[in-house]
Image (cartoon, helix red, strand yellow):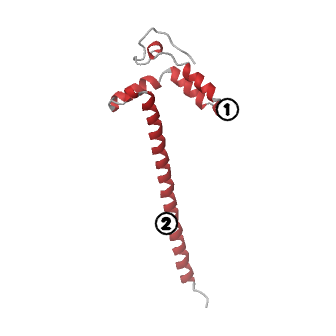
Amino acid sequence: MAKSYDERIAEAKLKIEQEQNRMKQLIQAQKKEERNARTKRLCSRMGLFESMLPDTIPLTDEQFKIFLEKTVTTEHSRRILGGLTAPNAAAATPQAVGAAAQAHTNPTENGAGREPGEGNGARVSS
């Protein structure tokens, strides 16, 4: 016996509802996977950071923020990051990245830890 239009509409609505629920589940699973990947990345990077600079461990959050602002926002740091994120960075060899890291000068020589405008007045241009 053929189904009435009302029965077919009800079945279609049920299928739509089931697919919407499935879509919600997939979105939730995707978000969870992204959160887990971010957490893993943050833990991994911070662990590496603390292993390289153990003196930062006892800093308060505010002190750590100031430390990052004064070191990461230097022109030298921006050039290194620019070199790593440039389109040709994928072709960069590990030796080139190591050479860039070795080129870093003593923080007291390049003005790290000073307020902008302090120091010997020398500016580094990119």
Q: Quadrant of the N terminus?
A: bottom right
Q: Residue at x 55, y 20 (%)?
A: 102
Q: Which residue in the structure is indicated by mark 2?
A: 21
Residue at 45% of width from left, 28% of height from top?
A: 52
- Residue drawn at x 50%, y 16% is 105
Looking at the picture, how far across and down is residue 98, in whole percent? Answer: 58, 25
Please state which of residues 110 and 97 is positioned toward the viewer in this rendering. Answer: 97
Q: Secondary structure at mark 2?
A: helix
- Compute the Cα span from label 1 to label 2: 44 Å
Query: At x 46% / y 9%, what residue is drawn?
Result: 121
Under circle 1, the secondary element is: helix
Q: Quadrant of the C terminus?
A: top right
Q: Which residue is mark 1?
A: 91
Crowding at dot 1, Cα within 10 Å, few <14 / some 14-19 / many 20+, comes out as few
Q: Amino acid at mark 1?
A: Ala
Compared to residue 29, the image places residue 69 above or below, namely above
**Which is in the foreground here, disc 1 or disc 2?**
1
